[in-house]
Image (cartoon, helix red, strand yellow):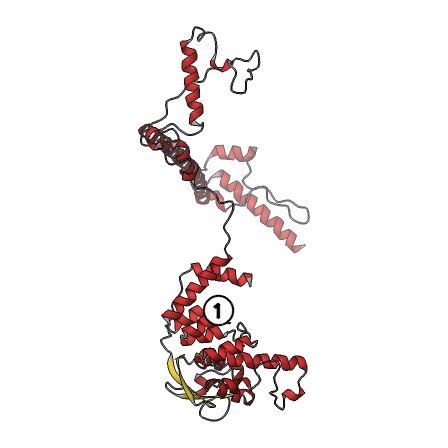
Amino acid sequence: MSKLNGLQHKRGKEKVKKYKRRPDAFTVHVTVEPTEEKFKLNDVYNDMTVAQLKDEVEIATGIPVSLQRLSYLDEGELPDQSDVRSNDFVPGCTVKLKVWPMYRELVEAVVANDVEWVFKLGVTDPSDYHTPASDYMTKKSRKAWLEERAFVALCLAAHRGYEEIAIKLIETGAKVNMQTPTGKTPLHLASAKGNGEIINTLLSHGADVNMEDHNGNTALTIAERFGSKVCSRNLFQFQWQERAKRIKPSKNVPLFAHQYHDSSFPVWKRGKSAQIYVSKILKPGEFEGTALSAPKSGRHPSLAHKQIRDATFFSDSQDSTSVDMESFPDDSGTLPPIGRTNKKTVMKKPLSYEEWVGKQKEIQKKIMAENKKKAEEEMQRKLEEEEKQKEENEKLGYEMWLAEREQEKLEKSPRHSLPYKNQPNVPDGRSLLPVHQDGALRLYLRSLGKSKSGVNYEDWLNEKENEINQLVKHLHTSV
Protein backbone atom coordinates (compact mmCIF):
# COMPACT_ATOMS: atom_id res chain seq x y z
CA MET A 1 0.00 0.00 0.00
CA SER A 2 2.89 2.36 0.73
CA LYS A 3 4.26 1.76 -2.74
CA LEU A 4 0.84 2.56 -4.20
CA ASN A 5 0.65 5.74 -2.17
CA GLY A 6 4.10 6.75 -3.38
CA LEU A 7 3.05 6.22 -6.98
CA GLN A 8 -0.09 8.25 -6.40
CA HIS A 9 1.94 11.03 -4.77
CA LYS A 10 4.23 11.13 -7.79
CA ARG A 11 1.29 11.07 -10.17
CA GLY A 12 -0.39 13.89 -8.28
CA LYS A 13 2.45 16.21 -9.23
CA GLU A 14 1.95 15.49 -12.91
CA LYS A 15 -0.66 17.20 -15.01
CA VAL A 16 -3.80 15.09 -15.24
CA LYS A 17 -4.38 13.94 -18.81
CA LYS A 18 -7.88 14.49 -20.15
CA TYR A 19 -9.75 11.53 -21.59
CA LYS A 20 -9.99 11.64 -25.36
CA ARG A 21 -12.56 9.63 -27.26
CA ARG A 22 -11.32 7.65 -30.21
CA PRO A 23 -12.47 8.96 -33.60
CA ASP A 24 -13.77 5.50 -34.61
CA ALA A 25 -15.87 5.00 -31.45
CA PHE A 26 -19.64 4.52 -31.71
CA THR A 27 -22.60 4.11 -29.36
CA VAL A 28 -24.14 0.83 -28.18
CA HIS A 29 -27.19 0.36 -25.94
CA VAL A 30 -27.24 -2.22 -23.13
CA THR A 31 -30.46 -3.61 -21.70
CA VAL A 32 -30.38 -5.29 -18.28
CA GLU A 33 -32.81 -8.18 -18.53
CA PRO A 34 -33.82 -8.59 -14.81
CA THR A 35 -34.55 -4.88 -14.23
CA GLU A 36 -35.36 -3.78 -17.82
CA GLU A 37 -32.97 -0.84 -17.42
CA LYS A 38 -31.30 0.62 -20.48
CA PHE A 39 -27.83 2.17 -20.51
CA LYS A 40 -25.73 3.81 -23.22
CA LEU A 41 -22.07 3.04 -24.02
CA ASN A 42 -20.41 5.84 -26.01
CA ASP A 43 -16.89 4.40 -26.31
CA VAL A 44 -17.29 1.19 -28.29
CA TYR A 45 -15.02 0.46 -31.25
CA ASN A 46 -14.48 -2.49 -33.55
CA ASP A 47 -11.08 -3.54 -32.15
CA MET A 48 -12.54 -3.86 -28.65
CA THR A 49 -12.81 -7.38 -27.25
CA VAL A 50 -15.88 -8.63 -25.43
CA ALA A 51 -13.87 -8.66 -22.18
CA GLN A 52 -13.13 -4.94 -22.66
CA LEU A 53 -16.79 -4.37 -23.52
CA LYS A 54 -17.80 -5.99 -20.21
CA ASP A 55 -15.43 -3.60 -18.43
CA GLU A 56 -17.33 -0.66 -19.95
CA VAL A 57 -20.64 -2.31 -19.10
CA GLU A 58 -19.51 -2.65 -15.48
CA ILE A 59 -18.92 1.10 -15.25
CA ALA A 60 -22.23 1.90 -16.99
CA THR A 61 -24.48 -0.53 -15.05
CA GLY A 62 -22.62 -1.13 -11.76
CA ILE A 63 -22.87 -4.91 -12.23
CA PRO A 64 -19.49 -6.69 -11.81
CA VAL A 65 -18.15 -8.55 -14.84
CA SER A 66 -18.27 -11.86 -12.97
CA LEU A 67 -22.10 -11.68 -13.07
CA GLN A 68 -22.47 -10.57 -16.70
CA ARG A 69 -23.66 -12.69 -19.63
CA LEU A 70 -23.80 -10.65 -22.84
CA SER A 71 -25.76 -11.71 -25.92
CA TYR A 72 -26.44 -10.09 -29.28
CA LEU A 73 -28.87 -11.05 -32.07
CA ASP A 74 -29.51 -14.41 -30.38
CA GLU A 75 -29.47 -15.96 -26.93
CA GLY A 76 -25.89 -17.23 -27.23
CA GLU A 77 -23.29 -15.77 -24.87
CA LEU A 78 -20.53 -13.72 -26.49
CA PRO A 79 -17.02 -15.20 -25.95
CA ASP A 80 -14.64 -12.93 -24.06
CA GLN A 81 -11.80 -13.46 -26.57
CA SER A 82 -13.83 -12.36 -29.61
CA ASP A 83 -13.95 -8.76 -30.71
CA VAL A 84 -16.79 -6.43 -31.61
CA ARG A 85 -16.15 -6.63 -35.35
CA SER A 86 -16.41 -10.41 -35.46
CA ASN A 87 -19.80 -10.24 -33.68
CA ASP A 88 -21.23 -7.84 -36.34
CA PHE A 89 -21.88 -4.92 -34.01
CA VAL A 90 -23.34 -1.83 -35.68
CA PRO A 91 -23.67 1.70 -34.27
CA GLY A 92 -26.79 2.07 -32.16
CA CYS A 93 -27.37 -1.66 -31.67
CA THR A 94 -28.73 -3.15 -28.44
CA VAL A 95 -26.92 -5.77 -26.37
CA LYS A 96 -28.71 -7.86 -23.76
CA LEU A 97 -27.19 -8.24 -20.31
CA LYS A 98 -28.23 -11.28 -18.32
CA VAL A 99 -27.20 -11.86 -14.70
CA TRP A 100 -26.25 -15.20 -13.22
CA PRO A 101 -29.38 -16.78 -11.66
CA MET A 102 -27.76 -16.91 -8.20
CA TYR A 103 -27.57 -13.07 -8.10
CA ARG A 104 -30.63 -12.16 -10.19
CA GLU A 105 -33.01 -11.60 -7.25
CA LEU A 106 -30.35 -9.58 -5.35
CA VAL A 107 -29.90 -7.25 -8.33
CA GLU A 108 -33.65 -6.75 -8.59
CA ALA A 109 -33.91 -5.95 -4.87
CA VAL A 110 -31.11 -3.35 -4.85
CA VAL A 111 -32.37 -1.66 -8.03
CA ALA A 112 -35.86 -1.49 -6.45
CA ASN A 113 -34.26 0.25 -3.39
CA ASP A 114 -36.07 -2.15 -1.05
CA VAL A 115 -33.92 -2.34 2.11
CA GLU A 116 -35.86 -5.19 3.77
CA TRP A 117 -35.83 -7.30 0.64
CA VAL A 118 -32.06 -6.77 0.20
CA PHE A 119 -31.21 -7.88 3.74
CA LYS A 120 -33.30 -11.04 3.35
CA LEU A 121 -31.10 -12.22 0.46
CA GLY A 122 -27.90 -13.12 2.33
CA VAL A 123 -25.84 -9.93 2.54
CA THR A 124 -24.89 -10.32 6.23
CA ASP A 125 -22.99 -12.92 8.19
CA PRO A 126 -24.66 -14.89 9.71
CA SER A 127 -27.73 -15.17 7.49
CA ASP A 128 -30.57 -17.67 7.06
CA TYR A 129 -30.56 -17.24 3.30
CA HIS A 130 -29.55 -20.32 1.38
CA THR A 131 -29.60 -21.79 -2.11
CA PRO A 132 -29.29 -25.38 -3.30
CA ALA A 133 -25.60 -24.76 -3.95
CA SER A 134 -24.95 -23.03 -0.62
CA ASP A 135 -26.26 -26.02 1.35
CA TYR A 136 -23.13 -27.93 0.35
CA MET A 137 -20.64 -25.15 1.19
CA THR A 138 -18.23 -25.30 4.09
CA LYS A 139 -18.33 -22.66 6.80
CA LYS A 140 -15.37 -20.82 5.29
CA SER A 141 -16.77 -20.95 1.76
CA ARG A 142 -20.21 -19.76 2.94
CA LYS A 143 -18.60 -16.78 4.70
CA ALA A 144 -16.76 -15.76 1.53
CA TRP A 145 -19.97 -16.23 -0.47
CA LEU A 146 -21.94 -13.92 1.85
CA GLU A 147 -19.16 -11.29 1.71
CA GLU A 148 -19.27 -11.38 -2.08
CA ARG A 149 -23.07 -10.91 -2.11
CA ALA A 150 -22.77 -7.95 0.26
CA PHE A 151 -20.10 -6.42 -1.98
CA VAL A 152 -22.27 -6.85 -5.10
CA ALA A 153 -25.16 -5.15 -3.32
CA LEU A 154 -22.84 -2.30 -2.22
CA CYS A 155 -21.60 -1.80 -5.79
CA LEU A 156 -25.16 -1.54 -7.11
CA ALA A 157 -26.24 0.79 -4.28
CA ALA A 158 -23.21 3.07 -4.81
CA HIS A 159 -23.83 3.16 -8.56
CA ARG A 160 -27.55 3.93 -8.17
CA GLY A 161 -26.94 6.45 -5.34
CA TYR A 162 -28.93 4.58 -2.66
CA GLU A 163 -27.26 5.97 0.44
CA GLU A 164 -29.45 4.14 3.02
CA ILE A 165 -28.68 0.69 1.62
CA ALA A 166 -24.97 1.54 1.30
CA ILE A 167 -24.67 2.73 4.91
CA LYS A 168 -26.45 -0.33 6.32
CA LEU A 169 -24.35 -2.68 4.20
CA ILE A 170 -21.12 -1.06 5.42
CA GLU A 171 -22.29 -1.13 9.04
CA THR A 172 -23.15 -4.84 8.77
CA GLY A 173 -19.71 -5.78 7.46
CA ALA A 174 -19.59 -5.05 3.72
CA LYS A 175 -16.03 -4.27 2.63
CA VAL A 176 -15.87 -0.80 1.12
CA ASN A 177 -12.42 -1.35 -0.49
CA MET A 178 -13.14 -4.77 -1.99
CA GLN A 179 -12.51 -4.93 -5.74
CA THR A 180 -14.29 -6.49 -8.70
CA PRO A 181 -12.35 -8.80 -11.07
CA THR A 182 -11.39 -5.68 -13.05
CA GLY A 183 -10.10 -3.90 -9.92
CA LYS A 184 -12.99 -1.46 -9.41
CA THR A 185 -14.33 -0.49 -6.00
CA PRO A 186 -17.76 0.96 -5.10
CA LEU A 187 -16.06 4.38 -5.14
CA HIS A 188 -15.14 3.91 -8.81
CA LEU A 189 -18.74 3.06 -9.73
CA ALA A 190 -20.16 5.98 -7.73
CA SER A 191 -17.69 8.36 -9.40
CA ALA A 192 -18.80 7.17 -12.84
CA LYS A 193 -22.38 8.34 -12.10
CA GLY A 194 -21.36 11.53 -10.27
CA ASN A 195 -23.19 10.77 -7.03
CA GLY A 196 -21.58 13.29 -4.68
CA GLU A 197 -23.47 12.27 -1.53
CA ILE A 198 -22.73 8.57 -1.86
CA ILE A 199 -19.08 9.44 -2.61
CA ASN A 200 -18.82 11.41 0.63
CA THR A 201 -20.45 8.51 2.48
CA LEU A 202 -17.95 6.00 1.10
CA LEU A 203 -15.00 8.29 1.87
CA SER A 204 -16.20 8.87 5.42
CA HIS A 205 -16.39 5.08 5.94
CA GLY A 206 -12.77 4.46 4.85
CA ALA A 207 -12.87 4.18 1.05
CA ASP A 208 -9.38 4.46 -0.47
CA VAL A 209 -9.37 7.38 -2.91
CA ASN A 210 -6.00 6.36 -4.36
CA MET A 211 -6.91 2.76 -5.28
CA GLU A 212 -6.50 1.93 -8.98
CA ASP A 213 -8.25 -0.57 -11.19
CA HIS A 214 -6.46 -2.86 -13.64
CA ASN A 215 -6.38 -0.05 -16.22
CA GLY A 216 -4.64 2.33 -13.78
CA ASN A 217 -7.74 4.51 -13.27
CA THR A 218 -8.61 6.01 -9.90
CA ALA A 219 -11.99 7.35 -8.83
CA LEU A 220 -10.76 10.85 -9.71
CA THR A 221 -9.79 9.93 -13.29
CA ILE A 222 -13.13 8.15 -13.84
CA ALA A 223 -15.06 11.18 -12.55
CA GLU A 224 -13.08 13.46 -14.89
CA ARG A 225 -13.70 11.10 -17.80
CA PHE A 226 -17.49 11.31 -17.40
CA GLY A 227 -17.41 15.06 -16.78
CA SER A 228 -18.49 15.24 -13.13
CA LYS A 229 -16.72 18.42 -12.02
CA VAL A 230 -18.22 18.52 -8.52
CA CYS A 231 -17.17 14.95 -7.75
CA SER A 232 -13.74 15.58 -9.24
CA ARG A 233 -13.21 18.61 -7.03
CA ASN A 234 -14.36 16.74 -3.90
CA LEU A 235 -12.17 13.73 -4.65
CA PHE A 236 -9.16 15.92 -5.41
CA GLN A 237 -9.61 17.88 -2.17
CA PHE A 238 -10.02 14.72 -0.11
CA GLN A 239 -6.95 13.20 -1.78
CA TRP A 240 -4.75 16.14 -0.77
CA GLN A 241 -6.17 16.14 2.74
CA GLU A 242 -5.16 12.51 3.14
CA ARG A 243 -1.67 13.29 1.86
CA ALA A 244 -1.35 16.18 4.28
CA LYS A 245 -2.12 13.87 7.18
CA ARG A 246 0.72 11.53 6.21
CA ILE A 247 3.32 14.26 5.70
CA LYS A 248 5.63 14.93 8.64
CA PRO A 249 7.72 18.12 8.83
CA SER A 250 11.44 17.61 8.38
CA LYS A 251 13.64 18.43 11.32
CA ASN A 252 16.84 19.22 9.45
CA VAL A 253 15.82 21.55 6.66
CA PRO A 254 18.81 22.77 4.59
CA LEU A 255 19.23 26.52 4.44
CA PHE A 256 19.25 28.54 1.27
CA ALA A 257 22.12 30.81 0.32
CA HIS A 258 20.39 33.98 1.52
CA GLN A 259 19.60 32.40 4.92
CA TYR A 260 23.22 32.00 6.07
CA HIS A 261 23.46 35.69 7.03
CA ASP A 262 21.11 38.24 8.46
CA SER A 263 19.40 40.02 5.59
CA SER A 264 18.10 42.90 7.75
CA PHE A 265 21.34 44.86 7.29
CA PRO A 266 21.98 46.57 3.94
CA VAL A 267 25.24 44.70 3.30
CA TRP A 268 24.99 45.33 -0.43
CA LYS A 269 25.79 49.02 0.18
CA ARG A 270 29.04 48.53 2.10
CA GLY A 271 30.17 45.10 0.89
CA LYS A 272 31.11 43.66 4.30
CA SER A 273 29.32 40.32 3.86
CA ALA A 274 28.02 40.51 0.33
CA GLN A 275 31.01 38.61 -1.08
CA ILE A 276 30.23 35.56 1.10
CA TYR A 277 26.60 35.58 -0.01
CA VAL A 278 27.48 35.94 -3.68
CA SER A 279 30.12 33.20 -3.53
CA LYS A 280 27.44 30.66 -2.53
CA ILE A 281 25.13 31.33 -5.46
CA LEU A 282 27.53 32.04 -8.34
CA LYS A 283 29.30 29.45 -10.46
CA PRO A 284 33.06 28.90 -10.04
CA GLY A 285 35.04 31.46 -11.99
CA GLU A 286 32.32 34.11 -12.02
CA PHE A 287 32.90 37.63 -10.70
CA GLU A 288 32.36 37.48 -6.94
CA GLY A 289 32.02 41.21 -6.32
CA THR A 290 29.11 43.60 -6.28
CA ALA A 291 28.33 46.75 -8.21
CA LEU A 292 30.55 48.63 -5.74
CA SER A 293 33.50 46.25 -6.27
CA ALA A 294 33.29 44.25 -3.04
CA PRO A 295 36.45 42.26 -2.17
CA LYS A 296 36.76 38.67 -3.38
CA SER A 297 35.63 35.88 -1.09
CA GLY A 298 38.14 33.61 0.60
CA ARG A 299 38.64 35.21 4.02
CA HIS A 300 36.03 36.44 6.43
CA PRO A 301 35.65 40.24 6.36
CA SER A 302 36.25 40.54 10.11
CA LEU A 303 39.73 38.98 9.74
CA ALA A 304 40.57 41.38 6.92
CA HIS A 305 39.49 44.38 8.99
CA LYS A 306 41.49 43.12 11.98
CA GLN A 307 44.61 42.71 9.86
CA ILE A 308 44.25 46.24 8.47
CA ARG A 309 43.76 47.60 11.96
CA ASP A 310 46.82 45.82 13.37
CA ALA A 311 48.98 46.87 10.41
CA THR A 312 47.91 50.46 10.88
CA PHE A 313 48.66 50.35 14.62
CA PHE A 314 52.16 48.86 14.31
CA SER A 315 53.11 51.12 11.40
CA ASP A 316 52.42 54.19 13.60
CA SER A 317 54.51 52.87 16.54
CA GLN A 318 58.27 53.52 17.03
CA ASP A 319 59.24 49.86 16.56
CA SER A 320 57.26 49.39 13.37
CA THR A 321 60.44 49.13 11.28
CA SER A 322 62.10 46.47 13.42
CA VAL A 323 59.12 44.47 14.64
CA ASP A 324 57.08 42.38 12.24
CA MET A 325 53.31 42.37 12.58
CA GLU A 326 53.00 38.60 12.58
CA SER A 327 55.70 38.20 15.28
CA PHE A 328 53.15 39.19 17.88
CA PRO A 329 50.95 36.59 19.52
CA ASP A 330 47.56 35.93 17.98
CA ASP A 331 44.25 35.55 19.77
CA SER A 332 45.30 32.21 21.28
CA GLY A 333 48.41 33.79 22.89
CA THR A 334 50.96 31.59 21.09
CA LEU A 335 54.15 32.96 19.52
CA PRO A 336 55.57 31.78 16.18
CA PRO A 337 58.64 29.45 16.29
CA ILE A 338 62.03 31.09 16.88
CA GLY A 339 64.29 31.43 13.84
CA ARG A 340 61.45 31.52 11.34
CA THR A 341 61.18 34.76 9.40
CA ASN A 342 57.67 35.57 8.37
CA LYS A 343 57.09 37.98 5.55
CA LYS A 344 54.53 40.65 6.06
CA THR A 345 51.44 40.04 3.92
CA VAL A 346 50.57 42.75 1.46
CA MET A 347 46.93 43.57 0.97
CA LYS A 348 45.94 43.45 -2.68
CA LYS A 349 43.40 45.76 -4.11
CA PRO A 350 40.36 43.80 -5.26
CA LEU A 351 39.56 43.71 -8.94
CA SER A 352 36.81 45.90 -10.25
CA TYR A 353 34.26 44.49 -12.63
CA GLU A 354 35.94 46.14 -15.63
CA GLU A 355 39.33 44.72 -14.63
CA TRP A 356 37.81 41.27 -14.15
CA VAL A 357 36.18 41.44 -17.60
CA GLY A 358 39.47 42.55 -19.15
CA LYS A 359 41.28 39.66 -17.48
CA GLN A 360 38.73 37.20 -18.81
CA LYS A 361 39.13 38.62 -22.33
CA GLU A 362 42.93 38.26 -22.11
CA ILE A 363 42.51 34.63 -21.09
CA GLN A 364 40.21 34.05 -24.04
CA LYS A 365 42.66 35.75 -26.43
CA LYS A 366 45.49 33.62 -25.10
CA ILE A 367 43.49 30.45 -25.62
CA MET A 368 42.53 31.52 -29.15
CA ALA A 369 46.19 32.34 -29.97
CA GLU A 370 47.32 28.92 -28.73
CA ASN A 371 44.63 27.19 -30.79
CA LYS A 372 45.59 29.22 -33.86
CA LYS A 373 49.28 28.34 -33.39
CA LYS A 374 48.45 24.66 -33.06
CA ALA A 375 46.33 24.82 -36.23
CA GLU A 376 49.17 26.52 -38.17
CA GLU A 377 51.70 23.94 -36.98
CA GLU A 378 49.37 21.14 -37.98
CA MET A 379 48.87 22.73 -41.42
CA GLN A 380 52.65 23.17 -41.89
CA ARG A 381 53.24 19.55 -40.94
CA LYS A 382 50.65 18.39 -43.47
CA LEU A 383 52.24 20.54 -46.22
CA GLU A 384 55.69 19.12 -45.49
CA GLU A 385 54.34 15.58 -45.65
CA GLU A 386 52.64 16.33 -48.97
CA GLU A 387 55.86 17.82 -50.43
CA LYS A 388 57.86 14.82 -49.30
CA GLN A 389 55.35 12.41 -50.79
CA LYS A 390 55.36 14.39 -54.04
CA GLU A 391 59.17 14.24 -54.29
CA GLU A 392 59.14 10.49 -53.70
CA ASN A 393 56.51 10.03 -56.39
CA GLU A 394 58.50 12.16 -58.85
CA LYS A 395 61.70 10.25 -58.10
CA LEU A 396 59.94 6.93 -58.55
CA GLY A 397 58.40 8.15 -61.80
CA TYR A 398 61.80 9.27 -63.17
CA GLU A 399 63.38 5.89 -62.38
CA MET A 400 60.52 4.08 -64.10
CA TRP A 401 60.80 6.38 -67.12
CA LEU A 402 64.57 5.76 -67.31
CA ALA A 403 64.04 1.99 -67.10
CA GLU A 404 61.50 2.15 -69.94
CA ARG A 405 63.90 4.11 -72.15
CA GLU A 406 66.65 1.55 -71.57
CA GLN A 407 64.23 -1.22 -72.44
CA GLU A 408 63.28 0.53 -75.68
CA LYS A 409 66.91 0.98 -76.66
CA LEU A 410 67.56 -2.70 -76.00
CA GLU A 411 64.59 -3.76 -78.12
CA LYS A 412 65.73 -1.54 -81.02
CA SER A 413 69.30 -2.95 -80.88
CA PRO A 414 70.18 -5.65 -83.56
CA ARG A 415 71.59 -7.81 -80.79
CA HIS A 416 68.27 -8.00 -79.01
CA SER A 417 67.27 -11.05 -81.02
CA LEU A 418 70.40 -12.93 -79.93
CA PRO A 419 70.32 -15.30 -76.99
CA TYR A 420 71.18 -13.84 -73.61
CA LYS A 421 74.51 -14.63 -72.09
CA ASN A 422 74.96 -17.12 -69.34
CA GLN A 423 72.44 -19.57 -70.80
CA PRO A 424 71.94 -22.77 -68.84
CA ASN A 425 73.72 -26.01 -69.73
CA VAL A 426 72.01 -28.79 -71.66
CA PRO A 427 70.97 -31.85 -69.61
CA ASP A 428 73.73 -34.20 -70.91
CA GLY A 429 76.49 -31.95 -69.61
CA ARG A 430 77.45 -30.19 -72.83
CA SER A 431 77.32 -26.45 -72.33
CA LEU A 432 76.28 -23.94 -74.97
CA LEU A 433 78.64 -21.23 -76.15
CA PRO A 434 78.12 -17.90 -74.43
CA VAL A 435 76.57 -15.49 -76.89
CA HIS A 436 77.48 -11.80 -76.85
CA GLN A 437 80.13 -12.26 -74.18
CA ASP A 438 82.97 -9.76 -74.35
CA GLY A 439 86.18 -11.64 -74.90
CA ALA A 440 89.51 -10.95 -76.58
CA LEU A 441 88.34 -12.22 -79.97
CA ARG A 442 85.12 -10.20 -79.82
CA LEU A 443 86.95 -7.05 -78.79
CA TYR A 444 89.40 -7.54 -81.68
CA LEU A 445 86.65 -8.12 -84.27
CA ARG A 446 84.75 -5.12 -82.89
CA SER A 447 87.81 -2.98 -83.44
CA LEU A 448 88.05 -4.11 -87.10
CA GLY A 449 84.59 -2.74 -87.81
CA LYS A 450 83.16 -3.80 -91.20
CA SER A 451 84.58 -5.71 -94.13
CA LYS A 452 84.73 -4.40 -97.67
CA SER A 453 81.40 -6.03 -98.43
CA GLY A 454 79.83 -4.06 -95.54
CA VAL A 455 79.44 -7.00 -93.08
CA ASN A 456 80.22 -6.34 -89.44
CA TYR A 457 82.82 -8.81 -88.09
CA GLU A 458 81.10 -8.96 -84.63
CA ASP A 459 77.79 -9.92 -86.25
CA TRP A 460 79.60 -12.68 -88.19
CA LEU A 461 80.91 -14.05 -84.86
CA ASN A 462 77.41 -13.99 -83.34
CA GLU A 463 76.01 -15.97 -86.27
CA LYS A 464 78.73 -18.61 -85.92
CA GLU A 465 78.08 -18.94 -82.16
CA ASN A 466 74.36 -19.40 -82.83
CA GLU A 467 75.07 -22.09 -85.44
CA ILE A 468 77.28 -24.00 -83.00
CA ASN A 469 74.59 -23.77 -80.30
CA GLN A 470 71.93 -25.04 -82.70
CA LEU A 471 74.20 -27.96 -83.66
CA VAL A 472 74.72 -28.84 -80.02
CA LYS A 473 70.97 -28.79 -79.36
CA HIS A 474 70.35 -30.98 -82.41
CA LEU A 475 72.87 -33.56 -81.26
CA HIS A 476 71.26 -33.59 -77.83
CA THR A 477 67.78 -34.20 -79.22
CA SER A 478 68.96 -36.96 -81.60
CA VAL A 479 70.64 -38.87 -78.78
Task: Tell me: 436 left or right of 389.
Answer: right
- Between 72 and 433, the residue placed more toward the observer is 72
Q: At which x and y percent is residue 466?
A: 55, 46
Q: Secondary structure at mark 1?
A: helix
Where, by quadrant of the figure, is residue 289 drawn?
Answer: top left
**Residue drawn at 51 percent across, 70 percent down:** 205
Where is 17 relative to 455, above or below? below
Residue occupying the point 41% across, 37% down: 382
Where residue 437 appears, as percent x and y from the top left, is 55, 38
Other residues around mark 1 within 10 Å, as few (<14) / some (14–19) / many (≥20): few
Q: Nearer the viewer, residue 295 or 411?
A: 295
In percent of width and height, residue 432 lies at 61, 45
Farthest residue in the bottom direction?
A: 74
Instruction: Please identify the quarter of the rendering in which residue 171 is found.
Output: bottom right
Residue most extreme to the top:
318
Q: Residue at the spot x=44%, y=64% of the render?
A: 238
Quadrant location, the N terminus: bottom right
Q: Quadrant of the C terminus?
A: bottom right
Nearer to us in this view, 389 or 67: 67
